[in-house]
Amino acid sequence: MGFYVRKSISAGPFRFNFSSGGVGVSVGVKGLRIGTGPRGHYIHAGVGGLYYRGTLGKAGAKNTARQPPHRTPDIQPQPSAPEYVADGVVMREIESGDVMEMRDETSAEVLDEINARQSQIRLSVILAVLCGIVGFVVGKAIGGVGPVVGVVAFLPGMLIGKWFDGYRRVSVLFYDLEQDAEAAYGRLVAAFETLTACAGRWHVAAGGKIEDLTTWKRNAGASMLVDKKPTVLASTLPQVVRSNVTPPSIHVGRQVLYFMPDLVVVKDGNRYGAIGYGELRTQFAPSNFIETGQVPSDAEVVGHTWAHPNKSGGPDRRFKNNRQIPICRYEALRLSSGSGLNELVEFSKTNVSQPFCHAISALAHLHGATATSSRQRSLTGRV
């Protein structure tokens, strides 16, 4: 599908418009708009790097452009990964650190605003409750129909509050991409669509090495045990952001990664962090997996094993229902950073991660940094 850069953004009653004259803000209804509104952020990307500027006040108002200084990211010491025991195997969690430690200084002001707005109280809840209470009291006073009037008043209160929240609790990011920046980001989006086309997509939450023969036999001769679940890849924005670009996103457990044109926004509950493309490290490699479930339609089957093998790898004939299980070749992709990101995803098809990693490196180079992308041995070798 590719992507396109919209020329306007709506945030509640406000509309941000982009033209050759700059970014303007208007408020009102169709046919009657006034040039005022909340703060938005204008982000320019091209061969000269990135610079940010805010829009305030009336439409067309200009602010001084700010070119953030280059700063080497702080490398946070990584604590030991939490461990637990499952099926007799010590499992080590593959988990990111505190999202608030993930800060890209070039966009610190934007990130602070996103977190501040997200922490604001929802007016939709307050107005819905207040209107419901008032409606209930009025209903009781006029004839005992309090519950009915309360419900009727509850809904308008919620809708009005939601309308206000539409601009109180969101941040506006307006991207102006030069031709080279738009092409580089377009390659990232195209590579992401290749990932989404895979029949199987998983987030790997933990892994552990199988040490004893009994557990090895019980797990079809696998060398490692993993905890993974299907995950979601989609093109969507964080709920607290309005933008003229809809980024690719990957759900990695409780976090969500949003690949914006200038950086990766990391969502963890109601908190947000950010990682510059120059700090993002990528690693990918083929990974053999003993597939006890349904084999994805695009997976390559490279062999078979037995549900209960003997020491030599043949079937253990003490088990009556000892069936053969396919070994599939998948591809693992690790995303990490010195600020604490540490996530592992897996795809049912091989040779799909390299274009995505190369696109990340190209964006890092475009923004004046260098990303590390390397192909290593199997990151989750289970056979």
Image: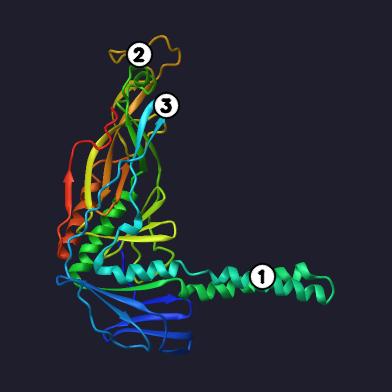
Residue 211 higher or lower than 370, as above or below: above
Residue 217 higher or lower than 108, as above or below: above
Q: Are marks 2 and 3 in contact (CB under 8 Å)?
A: no
**Which residue occupies 41% across, 69% down?**
116
Residue 372: percent from left, percent from top = 17, 51
Per the model, the C-alpha gap separating discs 2 and 1 is: 66 Å
Residue 57: percent from left, percent from top = 37, 87
- The local crowd at label 2, few if under 14, some if 14 to 19, many if 20 or more residues have their Cα within 10 Å, is some
Looking at this view, is 107 or 98 the one in front? 98
Q: Which is more foreground, mark 2 or mark 1?
A: 1
Mark 1 lies on a secondary structure that is helix
Q: Quadrant of residue 347?
A: top left
Q: Can you say which quadrant of the picture contains the N terminus?
A: bottom left
- Give the numbered dot on residue 154: 1
Q: Is residue 1 visible?
A: no
Residue 17: percent from left, percent from top = 36, 81
**Which residue occupies 23% across, 36% down?**
378
Q: Which is more foreground, mark 1 or mark 3?
A: 3
Q: Is residue 237 left or right of residue 263?
A: right
**Which residue occupies 31% across, 37% down?**
299
Residue indicated by mark 2? 315
The amino acid sitting under disc 1 is Phe
Residue 278: percent from left, percent from top = 19, 59
Residue 136 higher or lower than 287, as above or below: below
The amino acid sitting under disc 3 is Asp
- The local crowd at label 1, few if under 14, some if 14 to 19, many if 20 or more residues have their Cα within 10 Å, is many
Residue indicated by mark 3? 87
Q: Are marks 2 and 1 in contact (CB under 8 Å)?
A: no
Looking at this view, is 35 or 187 the one in front? 35
Q: Can you say which quadrant of the picture contains the C terminus?
A: top left
